[in-house]
Image (cartoon, rainbow, N blue to C red):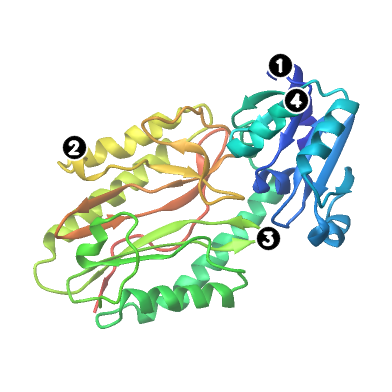
Amino acid sequence: MNRLQALTTTLPERGVDGILVSHIRNVRYLSGFTGSSAYLLLGPSGRFFITDFRYQEQARAEVSGFDIAIVNDDVSDFLVEKARTSGMHVLGVESSVSYAFYKGLLRKGVRIKALTGFVEDIRKTKEQREIRTIGLAIERAEKAFSLTRPFIRPGASELQVAGMLEENLKKTGCRAAAFDIIVAAGKNGSMPHARPTGNKIRPGDLVVIDWGGEADGYFSDMTRTLLMAGRDISRKREIYEIVLQANREAIGSVSGGVHARTVDKTARDVIKKAGYGEYFGHGTGHGVGLEVHELPRISRIGRETIRPGMVFTIEPGIYLPGTGGVRIEDMVLAKTTGCSVLTSLNKTLEILH
């Protein structure tokens, strides 16, 4: 069953006759369109791809299996008319649609039902082609890090390292970094999503580096933490080894049929037992694919049972205000039994001089 069939066959159980897809990543997933503005209107008796003048040539080159419509006026008028003539009496819409757009459809007499995650549920499990593409995004990111690593040393600023890493990502074939690169040295490392500054790396600093690559619209996401040689680094070495153990044990717990919360708890218990539970406040991982952060959510509030084919991160951390932080992030592919670790960079502690 292809992606469109998997979606449209669920319409009756969702209580709708058709679905409007507006989230551009979901549009790409279902149609192959790589532009930045389009809608899909899907039902048992019609499949419509709607965009505007800017993308008409691109749409005709990339999209097949849909009736392509170029609409330069109010797109809601077109959607209402097509929904009516195609027998879509109750239209499901994504939760990401704007309130103004939602109200506009209601005013024009469309019966609407808000649906959450109806495409994302399909996206959670990756096809072999997607897994290969994500693998290429990982390969590019790891190569870029290897090119950058010799320049990560005392005296270099966070911004310099981030800029060099971004440049190297482009050299390896990425259109851009997957997200704003995090380079957090010393005390800045206690902020999980710190922004790079002009602060220079100093002896004894922990340096947290979180980055990702891209390949054909798919992303990778990984983190490594390095330690600069210096005096009084014993506690920093200690928390690194705790996080590494949490990372490894969480990876070891991943398998088809295991609940996401179980994986999160495995990592969290290691850190809690070592006395640092209050310093690990974020989730253990998240799905990666057409978006850097997608389902499944590997956290205390995660709702998913892990299925073979899911690709997600394992990224426990400890963040000590005034000292710094450690995060070690890998990407894994869940299997029927166990998982494959897709990232391959060294993660044993490196002390750089």
Q: Whole-percent x and y of residue 245? A: 29, 47
List x then y, in percent, for residue 91. Answer: 74, 26
* Circles 1 and 3 in contact, beta carbons < 8 Å: no
Q: Amino acid at mark 3?
A: Asp
* Residue appearing at x 50%, y 28% in the figure: 304
**Is 14 situated above or below 149?**
above
State the image coordinates of residue 326 (x, y, percent, origin top left). 27, 56
Quarter that holds the C terminus? bottom left
Q: Would you identify the image quadrant in which residue 80 lies?
A: top right
The quarter of the displayed image where residue 174 is located: bottom right
Of residue 269 and residue 117, the one placed in the foreground of this image is 117
> Which mark is on residue 303?
none
Mark closer to the observer (3, 2): 3
Q: Which residue is mark 1?
A: 13
Q: How many marks?
A: 4
Q: Which residue is mark 2?
A: 273
Residue at mark 1 to residue at mark 4: CA–CA distance: 19 Å
Local packing at callout 2 (Cα closer than 10 Å; few below 14, some 14-19, many 20+) is few
Q: Which mark is on residue 216?
A: 3
CA distance separating discs 1 and 2:
45 Å
**CB-based contact (under 8 Å), mark 4 and mark 3:** no
Q: Can residue 313 be seen at all in this image of the molecule?
A: yes
